[in-house]
Structure formats: C-alpha cells, structure tokens
Amino acid sequence: MVEMGLHIAMLSAEYPPRWGGMGSTVYHLSAALVELGHRITVITRDGGGKALEQQGVNIREVKWLYAPMAFTKSYGKHALADLKKLHSEDSVDVVHLHCPMISWTESQFKDCKENVAPIVSSLHGSWLGERDGLRTAAEQKEAAVWANPNDLAILLTAGHYAKFERAAINGSDVCVANSHATKGDFLERYSPPADWNCQVIHWGVDTEMFHPSEEPKDTENKQILAVGRLAARKGYGSLLRTFAEVKQRSPNTELLIVGRGNLKKRLIKQAKHLGISSSVRIDSGMPFDKLAEEFRNADIVVYPSYYEGQGLIPLEAMASGTPVATVDHGPLPEMVDESVGALFTMADIDSMSSAILSLLSDRDGLEKRSKAGRERVLENFTFGQNAEGFSQIYSQLTV
C-alpha cells in the first residue's frame, strides 16, 4: 500500500463493457491501483452499456460524436470539460490519458496542466502504425481492407490525426509506451525533443482467468487457436493460407478463430476455397471464461498481426500455458522467443507454416515452452507490476 493514495483521473475512450486491448488494460490497471491505495475516476464514452463497477473506481461518462476517428476529438473535448468539473468537486492529483483514442491539441494539454493536474499519457500505439499495418494487409491481399469504415477512416485520415500524437509528446509530463517498439515508432515518426520523458511499461494480463490446464492435452488431435478482432490487419487471410499447408503435413489439426468483426463471411468463403472449411471454425465471440478454456485447450496460439502497439493475446496464451507462434516484427519479440514459442517472418506463408509445424511436432518442447511461458508472464507481465510502475510515476509528478 502507498502511504497516501492519490486521486487519478483516467481518461479512456474504451472501458468495459467496451472490451478491447485498451478497455481491458484500463479496467485491470484501475483495480490494481486501488489495491495500492489510490482512488480512480474513469472518464469514458457513454452509450456502451452499463459500465462494470469496481470498488474504489468511479465511472463518469461523456458524449461523443459517432464517427470514425472524429470521435477521438469530440470525446476529448467533452472529457476535458468533465475533468475540470470533477477537479472542482474533488481535486485530481494526476491525469492519465490513454492515446491515441483521445485527441487533444497542445492548447488543451496546456489547459489541463495549468488548471487541473500533471499529465501521464499512455501510448497504446500510433495511428500511422495502424495505417501502415492496413497497407501491408492490402499488399498481402487480405479481405475487406477497404470495407470496414473504421479501417477506411484510418487509411484516409491517420496523417491528419498524427498531429494529436505529436501534441501528446509535447504536452504530457510523462509518456509511457506499451513496448520498446512503440517508443521507437514515436521516436522515428515524430523526432521528439531531446528531453522527452518516455518510459516503457508493458501491459500485463489477468493471470487468474488465464491459467494452465490441469488436464493432459490430446496427443492425437491438435488444436490451433487464433484470437483477435476480425479485421484485415490481423492477418487471418495469411493464416488460412498457411493452415492449408499445415493441414497437408498434420491432417489431425483443427483451427479455431475467435473474434468479432465484419470478416467472418469472407473468411468462411476463403476457407471453402482452400478446401479446409471442415477443419476451420470461426466464432464471433464467447464469454471470457469460455475463451480462457479455449486458450488452455489449444496446443498452440498463432498471432499473425501486421501491426500491434503491444499485443495482449500472446501473453494471455502464455499465461494459459500455451506456446505462441507470432511475427518476428514490432513488439512481439519483446514477449515471445524460441523458449516460449516460435517466431516467423510477417506475411511469409512458408515461414509461418514451418514455425507452426515445428511446434506441433515437438510434444516435449511444447511442455517446456508451456511452463516457461507461464513463468515469464508471472515474472514480467502482471497488472500488479503495471500498477507499481505507474504509481511510481504518479508519485514523482506530485512531489
């Protein structure tokens, strides 16, 4: 416990029931900070359903414009107004923004620092990185790159919204990237000032929900799991093409894809075209306890994404005792290596199939990687560690 808890205003466009990488991390981080003695007020968007309540966490909701990308500005405007109202009622010690889904100008950052409190900005990734991931998806002929309104908005307007990321660099007291890759991305794209204070804290995962199975796995039939939003930049098209090759070498292997999005029909059609539809199941979503069970039951998890700020799915797999095959690109090698899984060249079908088959064919190796993955998460990627890291940053800003 900290000697004297602080009042932290957490501004996040996602909060459960708006689950997602950002919503999940803000939810769990808030609970872990309360455990350390802090008080948390989350200011998020309205209209998502009844917010999940947590002891010590106050939820406030604000209006926002229902439009791709533009919502980040309208949410940011209303969140700042509500933040100032909150501060007048209950003094705020630190403001914690979750970027890039909130867009503030440099004048808004200045307003907040002068009239409310110092600012910590979590960098979950960049719009330009998302755009480049979509461009790679288009090059790899992934389905429906131009069909999703949100993806289309990113492709067309990321350059414009990048100015708000630059404002976060210049206007925040401290920036905290979720990976060394994200920090490097911001350094390369924006050339921050020499005194830019940017630290790295990898997000953790729920190690109680995601835990290893006590039951032995089926040694005859093999299960591959892929989890994540059904969107072009997640690389499911390349995964299906890879699975068609894997199936020829490992005929008793099945593929389960779990995720929401507008690609399900297109992916089912692609699986039929490849002649693998009887071995592929696509589930649009399931309760977390059921998803956690699927993580435990799978022999391996494959994560072929073209862009991530960090990527939590590999950590959830490792926490579940399931080895991971993922890209040797961006932040993924910061979490996954040969001791807990396998790495492959992004969008390279031969490299991906080789990585998958090498894992599936080595039962003893899978067991070793299973134990090593769980240990790595417990040692380096927990919400308790996240809370300790951010608590230190908050304390430094309020001395």
Image: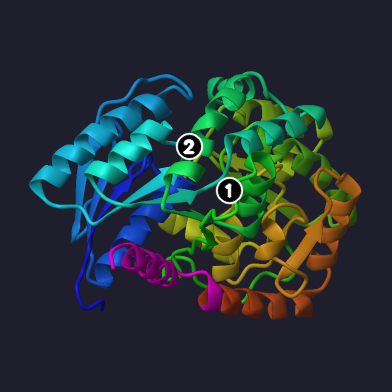
The picture quadrant where one finds residue 189 is top right
Label 1 secondary element: loop
Q: Residues within 10 Å of mark 2 (few under 14, many from 20)?
A: some
The structure residue drawn at horizontal position 29% and vertical position 41%, both measured from the top left corner, is 112
Q: Is residue 73 something that shows in the picture?
A: yes
Is residue 6 covered in magenta?
no
Query: Could you tell me the amino acid type at mark 1?
Result: Pro
Position of 119 with respect to 82 (left or right) is right
The picture quadrant where one finds residue 177 is bottom right
The structure residue drawn at horizontal position 21% and vertical position 52%, both measured from the top left corner, is 53
Q: Position of residue 7 (x, y in %)?
A: 21, 58
Q: Position of residue 95 (x, y in %)?
A: 31, 50
Q: Which residues are magenta?
A: 379-399
Query: Could you tell me the amino acid type at mark 2?
Result: Ala
**219 lies above or below 146:** below
Question: Residue at the left extreme?
Answer: 89
Q: Is residue 213 something that shows in the picture?
A: no
The structure residue drawn at horizontal position 64% and vertical position 72%, both measured from the top left corner, is 217
Q: Distance of mark 2 from mark 1, alpha carbons?
A: 12 Å
Q: Position of residue 83 (x, y in %)?
A: 22, 40
